Amino acid sequence: MAYIVRRLPEYPNDRVLVGPKTFADAGIYKISDEMALVGTLDFFTPVVNNPYDYGQIAAANALSDVYAMGGKPLTAMNILCYPLKSLDKDVLVEILKGGADKVNEAGAAVVGGHTLQDNEIKYGLSVTGIIHPDKIVTNAGARAGDMLVLTKPLGTGLIISAIKANKVFEEDISIVTKSMVLLNKTASEVMLEVGASACTDITGFGLMGHAYEMAEASRVTLSFFAERIPVFEGCERYVRMGLIPGVSKLSKKYLKDVIRIDSRVREGLVDVLFDSQTSGGLLISISKEKSETLCAKLKERGVMVTGIIGEVCERMDVSIIVSP
Ligand code: CO
Ligand code: CO
């Protein structure tokens, strides 16, 4: 997307604190010295077959960027596309109910929305939140010496792809759904309590894609220890079954010159690192001194962290290094 955004004209505006230039998928607009607005939007086709779960996932995913920046969501608007003739209306009610319940859990309110007839269902939300202008966490603050922490396992893209191909192992559906409906709220609160230098949520571009954005925005190199990265057990079998989503393949191809991967890291795991995520966790960059406290507090509050998964280095010839 960055290469498309780069072709657009720039419209300088002092109140835009975070805009398209930082490669982030959310923006921040300053209202006063004490308050700024966070705006973000995301929507997609169904990722699971249960409409209520799909609604919850879409909402958790849409709210995620506000949490990644350390903001507090206030309002949400629905975006819903649906085939008028063929679809059972109860399905739409379930999707919207899932979304509304999740927004409510986040302490925010659905205040409206827009629907459109389309061949395929698409659902998501536009979310508005608030943040203190001096307390914004962006993907541009990672510093050499920081540690990296990831708050949800990887592999949702592979499992969703298996669901769509009717080749999924039943047990994976509930595991991946549980993770995707989980708000990044707690992870964000703990991050703010402890104090992080940078953060991004892991979504469509996968861990490697969003880590690349962080490395570029912060002008550093990120070094990952592949075996320490949390991954859904069993998702590598979908790599062997040829179910790698198209976007994940593209991401791997696009980033091949900026990432150096140790040949000892097995190929199946490499594909999981590039796997496109839906409602993924937060990738947090934090000083070494605070990193243990962060992991301990996250675990205490039920967040699925495995610990330190990498570290931030001075800028090298590549943006990312992956070792076993
Ligand atoms: Co996003
Ligand atoms: Co994001």
Image (cartoon, helix red, strand yellow):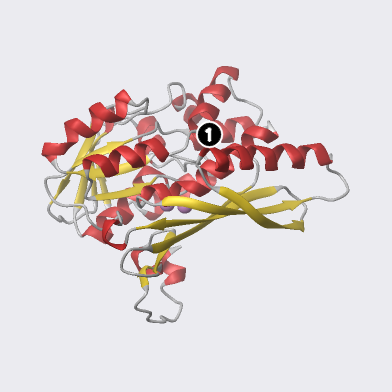
In the rendered image, the vertical position of residue 261 relative to residue 219, given as above or below: above
Task: Give the SS element for disc 1.
Answer: helix
In the rendered image, the vertical position of residue 147 relative to residue 177, given as above or below: below
Q: Is residue 79 left or right of residue 134?
A: right
Residue at the extreme right of the image, as rendered: 85
Q: Quadrant of the C terminus?
A: top left
Residue 257 in sight = no
Nearer to me, 32 or 212: 32
Give the x, y percent position of residue 110. 61, 50
Nearer to me, 58 or 101: 101
Residue 283 falls in image quadrant: top left
Nearer to me, 159 or 35: 35
Q: Is residue 162 left or right of residue 114?
A: left
Residue 231 in sight = yes
Q: Is residue 239 left or right of residue 47?
A: left
Nearer to me, 99 or 139: 99
Give the x, y percent position of residue 313. 14, 48
Ligand 1 neighbours mark 1 (CB distance < 8 Å) = no
Within 10 angstroms of label 1, few (less than 14), some, or many (20 or more) residues?
Answer: many
